[in-house]
Amino acid sequence: MRWKQFLTPVKSFDADQARNYMENRNSDELTILDVRQANEYESGHISGSKLIPLPDLTERLHEIDPKKPTVVYCGIGGRSRIAAQMLAGNGFENVYNLSGGFKVWEGEAAVGKEDLGLELFTGDESLEKTLLVAYSLEAGLREFYSSMIPKIKNEAALNIFKKLSEIEVKHQDRIFNEYIRLSGKPVGRQAFEKNVLHTVVEGGLTTEEYTNLFQPDWESAADIIGLAMSIEAQALDLYLRAAHRSPNPESRKVLVQIGDEERAHLKQLGKLMETIDL
């Protein structure tokens, strides 16, 4: 054992600093490393984080790019401080420990196992298939939002659902146009949508699972926005986990881009939350 690695000083971020640092970078420009155990990760984790429990870290260092900045977190900050020192002692130059750990994190977060929803992305699909799955995920969420509009009586909540549905339509348009551009196939929208998967929703959970998990008040604008933020965070997490394991550079790039768009949606929803009366 090299004791030097445990004596190597590392920088720390509080939750606000870490969130700002992440938001000012594309998702493929840094690594968010969770060094807790798998059951802790499953109950809640920072969206897009890579799970390597502390006991396994020395044997899995090769899975982390030492050239990228790495933000390390655990439950309250103790294990991540040790992990950050280990990384710094092994040549990682830009390592930051999240002080307070996941306990103090108030940014985007997801739930579920590492492989949740990844049956949709096998890792060896073509770029075209990757975009089709992404389009299907957006379509599933749009249908969910649209289906709720006739059921809502509260005007503020109703307007929120309409706005959310419009956001998903724009995201679908963007993915479809990207499909045309990258594939070079002049396919029409109707023909393209014949291949849409109708059993998926963003993030790898069904709408029923989302509602059972968060149990929102459908007449509360704040609850609806909170649910939407949770779904977008879950979607961000799924796209980045799929990107992590994709061997196809083009698919990986597209998945990261879509994930970063989900992060932009989260910002929009955050601003929207600030405009309503809680």
Image (cartoon, helix red, strand yellow):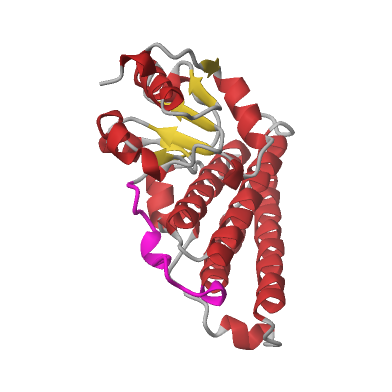
Left or right of 271: which side holds 44?
Answer: left
- Closer-to-camera residue (135/230): 135
- The picture quadrant where one finds residue 250 is bottom right
Where is residue 42 drawn, in percent x and y?
32, 40
Q: Is residue 179 above or below residue 217?
A: below
- Closer-to-camera residue (238/203): 238
Residue range of the region highlighted in magenta in the rendering: 113-129
Q: How many marks?
A: 0
- The picture quadrant where one finds residue 167 is bottom right
Residue under the point 69% across and 70% down: 178
Where is residue 278 drawn, in percent x and y?
64, 28
Tell me if I can see residue 145 in this picture. Answer: no
Residue under the point 60% across and 63% down: 146
Residue under the point 72% across and 36% down: 271
Looking at the rendered image, the quarter that the N terminus falls into is top left
Left or right of 87: which side holds 218?
Answer: right
